Image (cartoon, helix red, strand yellow):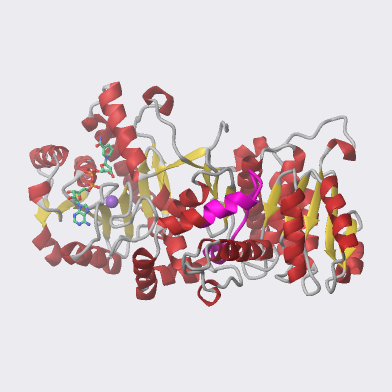
Amino acid sequence: MVIYMKYLVSSCEMKEIDERTIEGMGIPAIVLMEHAAMKVAETVEAYLKEQKCANQRILVCCGTGNNGADGIAAARILYGKGYEVTISIVGDMKSASSLFLQQKEIAENFSVPIISKLDFAEYTIDENTILIDAIFGIGLSREVTGIYKDIINKINTSVKRKVFSVDVPSGLSSDNGFPQGAAVKADVTISFGYSKIGLVMYPGCEYAGKVEIADIGFAPLGKIGMSLKYHTFEREDLILLPPRKAYSNKGSYKKVLVVAGSATMSGAAFFSAKAAYMTGAGLVKVITSENNRISLQTSLPEALLYTYKEEELTRNALDLLAEEIKWADVCVIGPGIGRSEISEKILTLILENIEVPLIIDGDAIWLLGQKLNSLIDSSREKVKEEDFSPGEPVNHNILAELSVSKSADKSIQKFADNTNENKIEERIASLKGILPAKTILTPHLKELSYLLGVPVEVIQKELLHMADNCIKENNLIFTIKDARTVVASKEHQYINMSGNNGMATGGSGDVLTGIIAGLIAGGLTEFLAAALGVYLHGLAGDYACRELGEYSLMASDIIKYLPEAMSLE
Ligand SMILES: NC(=O)C1=CN([C@@H]2O[C@H](COP(=O)(O)OP(=O)(O)OC[C@H]3O[C@@H](n4cnc5c(N)ncnc54)[C@H](O)[C@@H]3O)[C@@H](O)[C@H]2O)[C@@H](O)CC1
Ligand SMILES: [K+]
């Protein structure tokens, strides 16, 4: 589908690339390892040269798997260049890998000083100590406890200079970015071949520090018959934006219908409609509460307008609405429409009549959750509103803390005990029954929590797994909004890396729906519009943030910086 996109890999995928390169292509494992070690040594040496400090001591903490073997090889290279290097073996020798034993023997032949786990406790880490962390890599297979946890805590509290992690900060899950008991806080992570998913997700990216991807000679994916599941976009991928035709008029581009806003929420319709215009829609029509007429006519005179009275939606008005739905080439429903009976009627009307791409957001997602509650057998346990009530978007920093707290772990436990994936499957199957194929849903974590009946903490910790559940056996597209928004369809999975926490502000999500609609109007497929739309939204937010800072950024600023984000120069 996409030519430039960058892949993000899971530990399983990485192991497979490794194996197929070694076994299928014939590159010996030790050759890959030497390349890996050289990249680590080069990065550390570049830092030392830049600092121009004398008396630097390099301590290399090694587990006994292949991550530790990388560490030993890097230590040997740096030692050979004249640096003061000590290898500390902190892993269990009984489970040492053969490459580890081989690297240890080579290091011994080179006379690199080696100390053991016990000596490590005595080792004085002073202000001149640089640490290379090679305890665990992608082979981390369980919770970090006991002496390993103590060692990681010692590294985190005592190394003042710089920590370089090999492949992954030890203790961090390379699949979900959560520390497994304890994890090293690195300044720099040198990761091999591809970025691991855990290095970009929260809180993993905060543990990884600056991530450098080192090419160590893995075979091209096509050569080893592999395709990867997750990708992300970078600026050069904006080439995928729909081209503007040289000979065109407003009829050349499609018509977007935005059903948004209510008496107390006039801004939502404005943000969504304006963003749709700014990203390629030929015409935008807003269906909203009568109360918003004047403000919209003033703020966005370019938009066509159809208003209804919130107190009563007559049969006649419903018929007219059905006509308006036929007018559209793309439709957005939800931003700020409220959760009233009338909003529910409008949503039902749209679901019954829509034949074009549909984007469902905000209050409409909550209304869908309600529909599921009434559809699913009342004798079974329903989602309790007080448990999963949606509200303001979730602040990811608060959640990052929450998710490692005991309460979060407890609720994950509770989820594992009381709920099973069949329940999610049942709710998603019901959803599939009421939504047209390729509908794009754009829930934030609380909305998804309500829709699926799963606590927010569980969704956050298992985000990619939840995304998998959402798209199983259906043709829907889920855009799950978080600090790293995930866009998932049966065919493609996208993890977004643009954006900043200044964008966790009122109206930001409304802008996103408009952008996605605008890109579909310009000619992109639903999935690509959602993924590229999320990227563009974040990029415009980053440009806005650069000028205004995170505190002052508002939704209107994201719109203001869209042209700069979309310019391909
Ligand atoms: N050809 C290769 O095999 C290559 C491997 N590479 C390196 O190899 C790493 C993967 O190596 P491995 O698969 O050996 O795995 P790791 O070295 O990441 O970890 C496995 C070791 O850690 C132990 N372990 C796992 N979780 C533990 C826990 N919670 N507490 C205590 N011990 C625990 C295991 O028993 C085993 O000894 C990569 O991250 C990368 O650094 C790179 O050199 C690239 C090439
Ligand atoms: K490591």
The picture places residue 407, in percent across and down from the top left corner, at 38, 75
Residue positioned 55% across, 44% down in the render = 474
Is residue 504 depicted above or below 276 in this figure?
Answer: below
Task: Assign the C terminus to one quadrant of the image.
Answer: top right
Residue at image point 92% right, 63% down: 297
Q: Which contiguous range is marked in magenta?
A: 427-449
Whether residue 225 is visible, yes or no, is yes
Judging depth in this view, the residue of 408 and 379 nearest the camera is 379
Residue 291, x across and y down, in percent: 87, 71
Q: Nearer the viewer, residue 193 or 383?
A: 383
- 95 with respect to 413 (left or right): left
- Residue 42 x, y percent position in the rendering: 33, 41
For this rendering, which residue is in front, 54 or 90? 90
Residue 10 relative to residue 377: left or right:
left
Vertical position of residue 513 compared to residue 398: above or below: above
In the figure, is residue 318 to the left or right of 13? right
* Image quadrant assignment for residue 499: bottom right
Residue 175 located within the stretch drawn in magenta: no
